[in-house]
Image (spheres, rainbow, N blue to C red):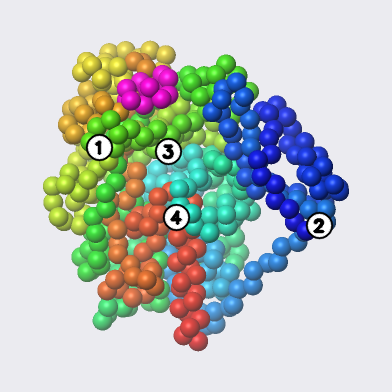
Amino acid sequence: MVKVFHDLVLRPRQKESALIKLCERKLRAPCRHFKILKKSLDARDKSDIKWIYTVECASHPVQREARVFPQVRGAPRVAIAGMGPAGLFCALRLLDYGVRPVLLERGKRVEERAQDMRRFCLTGDFCPSSNIQFGEGGAGAFSDGKLNTQTNSPLNREVLETFVRFGAPEEVAYLGKPHVGSDRLKDVVANMRRAILAGGGTVRYQSVLDDVRLRDGRLAEICVNGAPEPCDALVLAVGHSARDTFEMLLARGFVIEQKEFAAGVRIEHLQSAVGRAQYGAGYAALPAADYRLVSHASERAVFTFCMCPGGVVVPAASEEGGVVTNGMSDYARDGKNANAALVVQVRREDFGSEHPLAGVAFQRKLERAAYLAAGGGFKAPVQLTGDFLCDRESYYFGEVKPTYAPATAFVPLRAVLPPVMVQALKAAIPDMNARLAGFGAYESVLTGVETRTSSPVRIVRDDTLQAVRAQGVYPCGEGCGYAGGITSAAADGLRVAEQIARTLLARE
């Protein structure tokens, strides 16, 4: 009989092999099956920091039955626009059903994309189709690779186990805050591509979906790089920065709604300071410390997002003439600085228009203001936190040096951000500092602007996950407004693939 034991405790320097001995004492028999289901760090009491485990074990070997998928007959023409987590996981599940999808990616392979990003950071040479936002792996391929999610989808565990199957560290399947790291995530994405190709799928790079043609409310054909192609089903996994795609879909009559999001800056501290604040004196023996803070000190909610321990702030622009920031960490999280998005709730009333793409226009306005204020060339505006709070200009860096490349320029952030966002941040930083010592340290660095926290639109779909007024088209993932991170986007990709398979099987 399989047993699950909760709340097993190990101290930071204990080896996990001690868990097996604990299980054997509870089973009163040798442990022939052992699996960690959950592992989380309890650092609430700095004098008694410990790992808490949930484990599955048995006195006999355990084998799981593999799921059997019914096979779709014929050769339906299914296209997936976008190779972020939603598109990749959708493709993998379609292959399970015998459907061989065509993946269309406007950017390049993840290996080439990494080279383009290095060149951009070193020289400012920007490629509109190969950057943080666009290319194989999506925006998440150049982040911390965080796989924690606040959704409770039953698909979440399958997503984590799939990442492990394709090369992510085994602990990703059970850590309370799993992360792959940008360095390892690139290999995982490449392995997924190889599996898709081996299964009979097709991958086409630098292929832009530039038109979706409907007939009587149903998908008729698509255009890729200007050439029409037949298509039975189209998955829109385009990501939240595919602004030209949103414009095209709106022109074609798709129902698109405004969606609220958040925007602000990146804040950087020394990682050692975050470790001391979270763990106390013994921080060096523990994983790189993180944090998640929310403030309601003003009428606008302010929160930290995408916190990257031991990481860097990276240029995340997808258009000329705009500055966008994001955060990135490698698996080791061993960089000198910690950074996080520090963002303010953006409401529809801030958009100044009822137009479905008014949120996109709001993002662009902030990004272009940051670009111009810093002097162009994709330099980012920066200001010391203490100077921001006191309305002083910054002239020097202290212990915390900004990690953003290509370059930064001292700019009062009130010249970039709307007054309502400035006021909210000024109220939130001291409030957060009261809960995380040093968060509002004078020499911590604010870098602007962070605008791509989530999609500013939702492409409306019905109960069959098909776009309203456009049967055969399946809006999917974060860009279309149905996810908020790597794990939830991947889960939505699985969900959409299941629905497509059900539809195709029902037609047989």
Query: Which element carries disc 3, helix, strand or loop?
Result: strand
Residue drawn at x 52%, y 19% as measured from the top left: 276
Q: Residue 61 carries which label?
A: 2
Query: Which element carries disc 1, helix, strand or loop?
Result: loop
Q: Position of residue 23 (x, y in %)?
A: 78, 44
Q: Position of residue 296 (x, y in %)?
A: 30, 34
Q: Name the residue under label 4.
A: 489
| Crowd tier of the residue under label 3, counting other residues whose Cα lies within 10 Å: few below 14, some 14–19, many 20 or above | many
Residue 238, by quadrant, is bottom left
Residue 343 lies, with reference to residue 154, above or below; the image says above
Which segment did they paint magenta?
Answer: 429-440
Residue drawn at x 42%, y 29% as measured from the top left: 339
Q: Tell me which numbered mark, 4 or 2, is placed earlier along the sequence.
A: 2
Q: Mark 3 points at which residue?
A: 306
In front: label 3 or label 1 = 1
Q: Distance between the residues labelled 1 and 2?
A: 54 Å
Q: Tell me which numbered mark, 1 or 4, is placed earlier along the sequence.
A: 1
Query: Which element carries disc 4, helix, strand or loop?
Result: helix
Residue with the most extreme bottom position? 508
Q: Tell me which numbered mark, 1 or 2, is placed earlier along the sequence.
A: 2
Q: How far apart are marks 4 and 2 (CA)?
A: 34 Å
